[in-house]
Each structure stands twice: as C-alpha cells, then as structure tokens.
C-alpha cells in the first residue's frame, strides 16, 4: 500500500501510462521481457517503477532497478518517485558513478546504465533484483545497448534457476525493431505495449530561410518575438551546448529583466532594436495563432519579465530542479536547454518550442581515433521529439529555425552510439564477463568488425588479452584475432572504472611508490576540461580585459604546476598533477578554482574519482595500502622517470615524432609532428607545457581537431 498525497494522486491520474497499468502488469506477469513505448511525459519513468512496487516486486527482499543513460535523470527521477510515493530516499534511491543514497532498505533503485554494467561483473545473475527497467532505450547509448544484450541472456538464466526476473525496456519512440525483431537477442519477440500519447496538437512553423551561422542569434530573435506577441505559456529553446545556453540566457535576461520582487511593480523594458531586424522574409505570419480559440482572452504582454533558466547535463542538481517549479507569478518561464530536455526530463507548462535543429556530438575517426566535437543537423525523429515538448498541457507551437526543405534532408533517426565510437572499453568489460567471442554477442546493433579488431589489437598490446596465435590458416588466424582470452592483468584492468589505456597505468603504478601520482593523473585525464575555457571570444571590452587578466594568471599557474628540471618532461601531465595537488592542498574550494583558472566542477569530480580509484586499486592489491593524501608532495626525480615510463606503457600507441628532413620543405610541417596513422601534421597546442620545448618524441592522450589537429595531454619520451 502506497500513501500518496491527494495532489500527487490527482496529477498521476492525468498521466496516460496510468490507463495502461493493468495491461502492462499483465504483460509483465506473462512474459519475461516486455517493451513499453510512450511519448516523453506520458509517465513511464515515474510510474512504471511504482506499478512494479505495488504489484509486490520489491516485497521479497529484492529490488526494482531502473537504468538511465544520464546522471541527471537518475538523480532527479529518484527524488520525484520518492516524493510521489511518500517514501524516504533510503527506500527510493539512486546510484551514479561517484555517489548515491542506496541503503539496505532500498526497494527502488535508479542508476546510470554504467553502474548496472559494473554490478553484472560482480554478480552476473543480478540476484539483488526482481525486475530491471531499461529506460530511454531509444537513445541507443552504448551501455544501454550492451545491457539489453546481456539481460537477454540473464533473464532466461534466472528463470531456469527458479528465481525469475523481469525485464522492461522503455522507449519514447516506436522505433523498437532493433530490440524486438532481432532473433539473436530475443528468440520470442517481447510484446510491445504502446501508451496512448494524449498529446495535444503542436503546430510546426518552419523558417523560410535557414541561418547557417548564427542560429543562437536567430533563437534570440524568435524568443523575443514569442514573448512580446504571443499569449502566456512557457518557452523551451533547444541549443547545442553549455556555452550557447549561457550566452542566450544572458541576452534574454538583459532584454526582459527579472529581479526578485520586481514582478508586481514592473519596469517597461527598453525597446529592443536588435529584435526583428532581418526577420522580414519569414514575416510575422508564422507567429500567428489565429486559429487557436483560447487566445482571444489571453493577451500577450511583452513587458512582463522573462524567467530564464538554463538546463544541461553538467548543471548542478539544485539548479536543474528549478525547471520543475512554477515560475514566479507575473513572469513567463523560458528554458534554454541542450538535448537533455528532448526526452530525459519533462518540463511542465511549455507551450512554445524553439528548435535550432542542431545537436553537438563527438565524432571519432575510425582509423586514426582523432576526435572532434561537431555541431550537426539532428534527425527527424529528434526534431519531432523536441516539437512534442510543446503539447503536453495544451495545444502548442514549435518554431523550427530552419526550412522544411532542410528538415526533409535530415536523417530519419540518429545512429546508435555504439557504431560511432571506439569500443576497447566495452570489449575489455565483456571479456571480463567471460564473453570471449565478442563478435557473437547479441548487440541490438553490432559495432563494425573493424572497430572490434582495432579494440582487440589495442588490448593485446596493453597486455590485457593474450596474443592470438600466428600459425594456422589465414581464416583461423583472423578468427583468433577476434577471440583473444583475457589475461590476469586484463582482469585487474577491467576492475578500474576508466578506459583501458589508463587502467594499464594504474596496474603499473606500484613501482617506486608512484601510485598516488598515477591515480591523480589518471583521474585528471579522465575528467573532461579541467581548465576553464578562457580562449572564448569576449562580448565586451570589459569582459575582454578580465579574460586577458585571467588568461595571464592561468599561464602563470600552468608554469608553476609544470615544475622544473625533470618534471618538465612529463609535460601536460605534470601540469595536471600539479593542478590536482594544489587544488587539494587548498581544500578544493570554488574560490581557489576561480582564482587559478580551474573548472570547479571538474576538480570536484577528480576528487571523487581519486577516492574511487584508490579504493579500486586497494581492492586489487591490498598490500600497497594506497590512500588519498591531501598534502601530496611533488614526485621526486626518480618518480618522474618512473611516471614517464608508466605513461608510455599506457599511451604507447599514441606516439608522435617531430617532423624532420624533407617534410620541413613544406611550411605546413613547421613545428609539426608525425604520427604513424596520419598523413597530416599534428601539433602541440600553445597552451601545452611542451609548446616551446618541442621534444623529438612525445606521447599524447588524444588528438582533437579544432582549428588544427592538436595533441592533448602531451608528455615527452626519451629517444633510444
Ligand atoms: P516519461 O518517462 O514518459 O517521459 P515521466 O514519468 O518522466 O514521463 O514524467 C511524467 C510527468 O511527471 C511529467 O508530466 C512531468 O512533468 C512530471 N514530473 C517528472 N519529474 C518531475 C519533477 N521532478 N517535478 C515535477 N514534476 C515532474
Ligand atoms: Mg522518461
């Protein structure tokens, strides 16, 4: 029996998924696995775990587990469900990479998909669970895909052993054939239950012209127009990244200021000269809501403040929670979001969606491994998901900042992530699960054989897998390349929650008491962007001079952290080590980070990861007894030599040599490096510790293509 408050009761009854409770629970009882499809906002994530709970799935001492591809969703949904069920967070809990509130009383556990994968390594049968819900399966994140493959085997095993487990796969789109019609995955296709959308109609307005560059500016103009001319209702704007989100927030707040307490006695905002200019072509007819009868009474009032909130994955949870609360009275809610608002979170009260039509994705070159972030057009399915956000509570409008012809050229669906990135981490995890022939694994969408071969090769070179035999027929040799068994070193590496290259460094760290340093460096290399982005263009002269000051300060700090003498050769990794050490010494405060050009959030993450890696290392080799020392002294000269060897062992395939000889005739090779896999020159970034030294041989963490091909995380290697 669940004791819900009357308000929660009432809100639940409005959710379409509630009408399907009987159907869903009957299907769960009669089938080991089922698929539930329902539009975002229909109540899948918040309600289905409650159905299972009420049907007794958490009463035999086992838990109901729900996986989310995003940390944001795992945390916020666990809070929401706890609140709806009137249960404490010891009972409805969450677990994400570094933190959680799971207790021995936990009955419903939200977690990221990576967390569940780790649990499968510890207990393949997942005996703690009576049911697993894989949420947001349409996103096709790598771990989600792997989990579905694994669970397709675990569920029948549990049945055979007489302790049945249920699998529920939930998707916001109807495109589920990759799961249901994949004979290798489920021999009997699981039933698909469609939750009626009860979606209000959303009118789509296309731009006549498609801005190729300044879509943030276009989003600004459109939002201003909506606010000035259209009746009340929240606005949700989709952009591609955090920087864009903040820049648009700033502009809109300036245009329609909101201050606590100024909502009743309002100032008229200055007329915006910017808005509307250049908009003639698509005219204002696209803002016309003529056929909506409700509009007659509600008049737009452009003088009311706009309550502007950002929303993206890395935003602090308290900030994220704001979007669910009603905006202050007398204001209009306006949320500027990245993709997270597409399906993971449903924001109440949105009537207008502004969609830039783009998405930021990381791309990898299959051959060279070079990665780059690119903003590309999204898919038709995603654009339609975004539009759908406008029709949750009443009929809505979606303004697409691109033409219908451009939309027609979008791909229908986004590709599964697993086909777009290197897979060495997955292959190692799978080998550790004793899945020797990864090619035979029932992937919903398999990665390319090329990618699998490359992964096995790297793992062999790191010593995580056994060398394949070099004898026999060609065909057998090729097959052997794809089924190398795991080594004891590989098992140790698999227990570290970092990519295999870094796991190898951890495994070697015992020498010369280097472990604390290796842990700190690996943590820093694993967390993205530890330095603040000070190279961004300034918006005003004032900002420009501040940026210059901070840049100078960061340069100074970098020089300090890079150390002297032998340490210099560790290059960027020494800078990272110095930064982590200094930050910890100062107590890891926001102030220290701000003053030193470090990203506070990144430093907090590094701190947590150091703790976690330290525990993982102690679990593998308890005799070293490593601990996190807040007053870590810089490494000695001996240790630096040792650290460089360890780094080389992990990054050995990322070797680059200074261009020489005939190459130097061509100016494009000036100060450039050559790598085995690429014909093009790669460079050491001006921010790097080794930019001036330019050692003959270096290893790098990755190559990132921005204005040039730049190596990141560079350290020097001794020439033999
Ligand atoms: P789905 O998973 O099908 O997309 P959800 O279960 O996430 O749907 O959401 C159902 C409803 O619950 C939505 O209308 C959403 O607005 C509401 N909701 C979800 N989380 C919160 C929250 N933290 N605060 C208030 N309302 C919420
Ligand atoms: Mg959901």
Image (cartoon, rainbow, N blue to C red):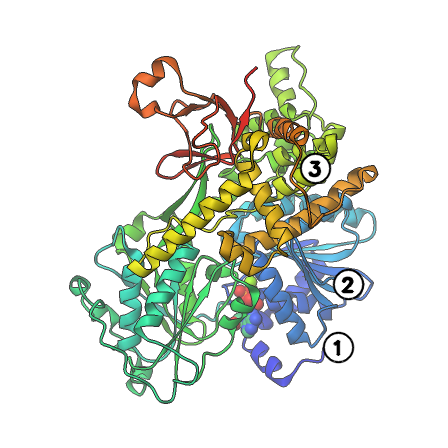
- Give the percent coordinates (x, y) of residue 499: 61, 38
Q: Which residue is mark 3?
A: 494
Residue 103: which disc?
A: 2
Tag in front: 3 or 1: 3
- Could you say which is closer to the camera, residue 373 or residue 670? 670
Residue at 50 percent across and 41 percent down: it is 559
Residue at 59 percent across and 72 percent down: it is 18
- Which image quadrant: the N terminus? bottom right
- Give the percent coordinates (x, y) of residue 345: 52, 64
> Residue 222 occupies which quadrant of the picture?
bottom left
- Disc 3 to disc 1: CB gap under 8 Å: no
Question: In the rendered structure, which disc, 2 or 3, sits on the residue that comes first in sequence?
Answer: 2
Which secondary structure, mark 2? loop
- Could you say which is closer to the camera, residue 581 or residue 464? 581
- Give the percent coordinates (x, y) of residue 13: 58, 78
Question: Which residue sits furthest front?
Answer: 565
Q: Which residue is mark 1?
A: 1
- Give the percent coordinates (x, y) of residue 439: 61, 31
């Amino acid at each position: 029996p669940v004791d819900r408050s009357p308000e929660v009761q009432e809100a639940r009854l409005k959710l379409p998924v509630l009408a399907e409770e009987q159907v869903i629970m009957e299907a769960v009882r009669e089938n080991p696995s089922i698929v539930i499809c329902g539009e975002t906002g229909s109540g899948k994530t918040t309600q289905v775990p409650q159905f299972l709970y009420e049907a007794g799935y958490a009463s035999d001492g086992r838990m109901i587990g729900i996986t989310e591809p995003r940390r944001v969703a795992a945390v916020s949904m666990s809070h929401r469900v706890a609140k709806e069920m009137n249960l404490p967070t010891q009972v409805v809990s969450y677990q994400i990479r570094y933190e959680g509130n799971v207790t021995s009383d936990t009955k419903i556990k939200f977690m990221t998909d990576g967390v569940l994968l780790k649990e499968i390594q510890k207990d393949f049968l997942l005996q703690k669970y009576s049911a697993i819900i894989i949420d947001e399966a349409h996103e096709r994140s790598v771990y989600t895909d792997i989990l579905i493959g694994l669970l397709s085997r675990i569920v029948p095993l549990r049945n055979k052993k007489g302790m049945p487990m249920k699998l529920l796969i939930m998707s916001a789109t109807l495109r589920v054939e990759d799961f249901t019609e994949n004979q290798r995955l489920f021999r009997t296709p699981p039933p698909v239950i469609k939750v009626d959308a009860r979606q209000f109609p959303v009118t789509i307005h296309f731009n006549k012209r498609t801005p190729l560059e300044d879509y943030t500016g276009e989003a600004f103009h459109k939002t201003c127009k909506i606010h000035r001319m259209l009746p009340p209702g929240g606005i949700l704007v989709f952009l591609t990244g955090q920087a864009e989100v903040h820049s648009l927030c700033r502009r809109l707040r300036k245009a329609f200021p909101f201050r606590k307490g100024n909502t009743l006695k309002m100032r008229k905002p200055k007329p915006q000269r910017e808005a509307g200019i250049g908009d003639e072509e698509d005219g204002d007819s696209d803002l016309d809501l003529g056929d909506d009868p409700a509009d007659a009474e509600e008049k737009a009032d452009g003088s009311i403040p706009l309550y502007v909130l950002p929303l993206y994955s890395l935003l602090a949870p308290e900030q994220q929670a704001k979007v669910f609360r009603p905006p202050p009275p007398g204001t209009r809610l306006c949320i500027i979001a990245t993709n997270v608002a597409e399906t993971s979170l449903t924001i109440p009260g949105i009537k207008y969606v502004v969609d830039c039509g783009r998405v930021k994705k990381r791309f990898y070159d299959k051959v060279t491994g070079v990665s780059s972030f690119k903003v590309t057009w999204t898919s038709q399915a995603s654009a339609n998901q975004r539009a759908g956000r406008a029709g949750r509570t009443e009929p809505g409008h979606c303004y697409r900042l691109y033409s219908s012809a451009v939309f027609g050229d979008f791909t229908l669906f986004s590709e599964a992530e697993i086909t777009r990135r290197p897979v060495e981490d997955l292959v190692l995890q799978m080998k550790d699960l004793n899945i020797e022939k990864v090619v035979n694994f029932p992937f919903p969408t398999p990665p390319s054989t090329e990618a699998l071969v490359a992964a096995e090769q790297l793992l062999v070179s790191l010593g995580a897998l056994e060398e394949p035999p070099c004898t026999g027929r060609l065909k057998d040799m090729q097959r052997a390349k794809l089924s190398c068994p795991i080594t004891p070193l590989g098992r140790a590496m698999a227990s570290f929650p970092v990519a295999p290259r870094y796991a190898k460094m951890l495994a070697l760290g015992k020498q010369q008491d280097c472990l604390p340093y290796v842990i700190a460096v690996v943590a820093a290399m694993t967390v993205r962007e530890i330095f603040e982005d000070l190279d961004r263009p300034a918006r005003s002269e004032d900002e420009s001079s501040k940026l210059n000051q901070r840049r100078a300060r960061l340069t100074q700090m970098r020089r300090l952290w890079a150390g002297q003498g032998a340490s210099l050769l560790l290059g960027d990794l020494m800078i990272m080590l110095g930064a982590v050490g200094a930050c910890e010494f100062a107590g890891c405060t926001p102030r220290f980070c701000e003053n030193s050009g470090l990203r506070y959030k990144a430093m907090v993450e590094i701190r947590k990861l150091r703790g976690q890696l330290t525990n993982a290392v102690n679990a593998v080799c308890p005799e070293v007894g490593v601990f996190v020392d807040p007053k870590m002294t810089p490494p000695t000269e001996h240790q630096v030599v040792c650290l460089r060897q360890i780094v080389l062992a992990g990054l050995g395939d990322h070797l680059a040599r200074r261009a020489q000889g005939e190459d130097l005739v061509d100016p494009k090779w000036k100060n450039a490096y050559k790598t085995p896999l690429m014909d093009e020159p790669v460079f050491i970034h001006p921010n790097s510790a080794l930019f001036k030294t330019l050692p003959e041989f270096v290893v790098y963490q990755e190559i990132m293509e921005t204005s040039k091909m730049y190596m990141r995380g560079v350290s020097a290697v001794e020439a033999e």
